[in-house]
Image: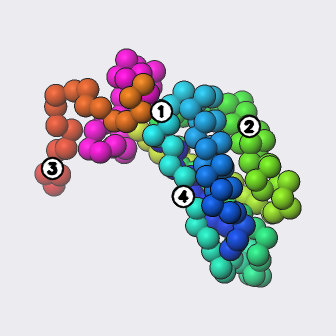
Amino acid sequence: MPLWQIYHPENAFTDEQKESLAGVITEDNHRFVGIPRFYVNVFFHETKYMYIGGKRTTNFIRITTDTIARAMPTPEIRAQAMAGTEAFLAPFIKERGFDWEIHFDETPRDLWRVQGLIPPESFSDAEKMWLEENRPVPYYDVDPIVPFAG
């Protein structure tokens, strides 16, 4: 799962541009990261009041991304991910004259569930099934929900 949160000023994107950008983000993650499309969540937050350095701005886009399905374990992989992300975002943000900032957070996989299911291990047969089905499919018989005993 990458969860993309895009905070932007009013009227920065048309509905068509939002759909196009969400599609580009989804396809990039599907092709280059190898995850099912349904893992990719993109939320647009139109914000009337944005302050950078204590001053109101109407030309700034802030993107936060939480990644779980795949880790970026080396500086080289992280640099490649940032460069690729900047490249596919450019037509939507940079080339339209917006200022922007983006960051990625990585959440441990054991703090992630999809419709109550523990997502399959990366590149496993079960994940391939999720990729083909483009939805979560039960692949084990044990209920992973264990009540806290403390």
Residue mark closest to the camera, 1 vs 3:
1
Reading the chain from its start, which is encountered first: label 2 or label 3? 2
Q: Is residue 126 left or right of residue 41?
A: left
Residue mark closest to the camera, 4 vs 2:
4
Residue 94 drawn above or below residue 145:
below
Residues packed near mark 1 inside 10 Å, few (<14), some (14 to 19) or many (20 plus)? many
Residue 74 lies within the magenta run: no
Mark 1 = which residue? 36
Mark 4 = which residue? 43
Q: Which residues are magenta?
A: 110-131
Reading the chain from its start, which is encountered first: label 1 or label 2? 1
Q: Position of residue 23 (x, y in %)?
A: 61, 44
Q: Position of residue 113 (x, y in %)?
A: 33, 43
Q: Quadrant of residue 80?
A: top right
Is there CB contact under 8 Å for labels 1 and 3? no
Please state which amino acid type lies under the numbered disc 2.
Gly
Query: Which mark, by number, is residue 84?
Result: 2
Cα distance between the residues tagged 4 and 1: 18 Å
Residues packed near mark 3 inside 10 Å, few (<14), some (14 to 19) or many (20 plus)? few
Reading the chain from its start, which is encountered first: label 4 or label 1? 1
Q: Quadrant of residue 54?
A: bottom right
Please state which amino acid type lies under the numbered disc 1.
Pro
Secondary structure under badge 2? helix
Q: Is residue 103 visible?
A: no
**Which residue shows up at 50% across the image and 49% down it?**
41
Cα distance between the residues tagged 4 and 2: 20 Å
User: Which is more toward the observer, 114 or 106?
Assistant: 114
